[in-house]
Amino acid sequence: MDRLIAIAFRYSRYGVWFGGGLIILSAFIVAAEVLIRKFFNHTIGGADELSGFALAIGSAWAFSFALLERAHVRIDSVYVWLPVRARAILDLIGLTVFLLFMGLLAYQGTGVFTDSVELGSRTMSALETPLQYPQFFWVAGLYFFVVVAVLMLVRALGTAFRLDFSGVQRQIGSKTVSEELNAEMRDIERRTAEQAKHDGGAAQ
């Protein structure tokens, strides 16, 4: 199971890079649209439409990465005061409910996608973009999240059956302050090592 999750983590990182690249590209398109409208009193059209597609696709593919990194925001004012076992149970319930919701969203998204394919739906802008293409990447990101969530839930349930509730929290619970601090320290060390290697190579 750990191997499957490691593979999912790698592909989720690719998905985040892909979605982030789309968002950056859309930012350049919007900037070009603003400049052309400002200085040439003309519009290329569709910039807001493309940026909306990029945001939807980027967000869908970022969900799984955030889940794997335990980076999603939680309101845990009461949670942090509970015993480890209670926190583990709440983590399992929370992930299960989240999985059911995202599964429903992916299912409904599939219906939207298939309707667009069957009807040949296009946007009502000057670009007349076929909706099936951006919707495909959006729905694919949602289903990838569902797969990742299932893997994480199965692993966490196995850990809970072994009565390792601290392990459950490490797998799917909110990050503690010490975990976030250690992650930041490792990131700083990694960047420092990369910078030193780069400086050493430049000196040669």
Image (spheres, grey):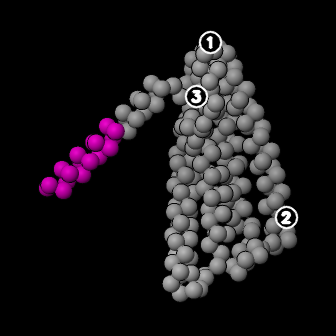
Residue drawn at x 59%, y 20% is: 80
User: Disc number at residue 115?
Assistant: 2
Q: Give residue 174's mark.
A: 3
Total of numbered circles in the picture? 3
Secondary structure of the magenta portion, mostly? helix
Q: Earlier in the sequence, mark 3 or mark 1?
A: 1
Q: Nearer the viewer, residue 63 or 77?
A: 77
* Boundaries of the magenta span: 188-204
Q: Going from the N terminus, do you reach mark 2 or mark 3 first?
A: 2
Q: Quadrant of the N terminus?
A: top right
CA distance for labels 3 and 1 = 14 Å
Going by the numbered disc 1, the residue's amino acid type is Pro
Q: Earlier in the sequence, mark 2 or mark 1?
A: 1
Check disc 1 and report the residue beneath it: 83
- In the image, farthest residue toward the left: 204
Locate residue 82: give its quadrant.
top right
As for residue 199 lying within the magenta part, the answer is yes
The residue shown at (24%, 52%) is 198
